Image: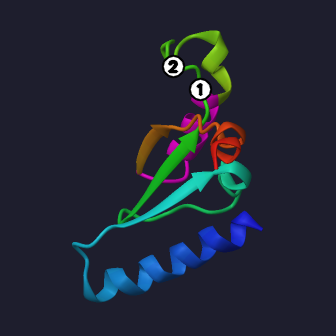
Amino acid sequence: MPGANFRAVQNIAKLVNKEYPHVKLLTLAYQGSLLPPKHLKFGNNVIVQIAAPMDRFLPLSDPKNQQTTNIIKAWTDHCPTVYFCECNAQLRRFLQLQ
């Protein structure tokens, strides 16, 4: 349940902000939590880092990366600061090497 994780981050961020307003918390959005919860908006002290697969050889504006671009845009409506890192882990290959 990814929404529960983000609600927990939001509650912790509110508590931290009372005593340490200069501190920012970073949380990850990936796999099952790539899409933001519909009714949740983070404050200024939360950063969401999106780890989404994309074609790294093409710009985000390319149609092949449209899904990732849509995810990033969706998060910008829910969080004032959004980071992005391209994630294309090939775990099957890694596990075969073990």
Placement of 5 over or under 91, stated as above or below: below
Q: What residue is drawn where x is 21% and y is 72%?
A: 22
Magenta region: 68-80
Decide which of tag 2 and tag 1 comes sooner along the chain: 1
Task: Considering the whole magenta stretch, tell me its main secondary structure.
Answer: helix
- Work out which residue is located at the far left of the displayed protein and give it: 22
Residue type highlighted by circle 1: Met
Placement of 66 over or under 39, stated as above or below: above
Residue 49 position in % (x across, y down): 47, 51
Query: Between residues 18 and 29, which one lies in front from this camera angle?
Result: 29
Placement of 61 over or under 70, stated as above or below: above
Residue 93 position in % (x across, y down): 67, 37
On screen, residue 91 versus residue 46, left or right, reads right
Q: Residue 54 carries which label?
A: 1
CB within 8 Å, label 2 to label 1: yes
Q: Can residue 36 be seen in this view?
A: yes
Q: How crowded is mark 2: few (under 14 residues within 10 Å), some or many (20 or more)?
A: some
Placement of 74 over or under 65, stated as above or below: below
Q: Which mark is residue 60?
A: 2
Query: Between residues 17 and 48, which one lies in front from this camera angle?
Result: 48
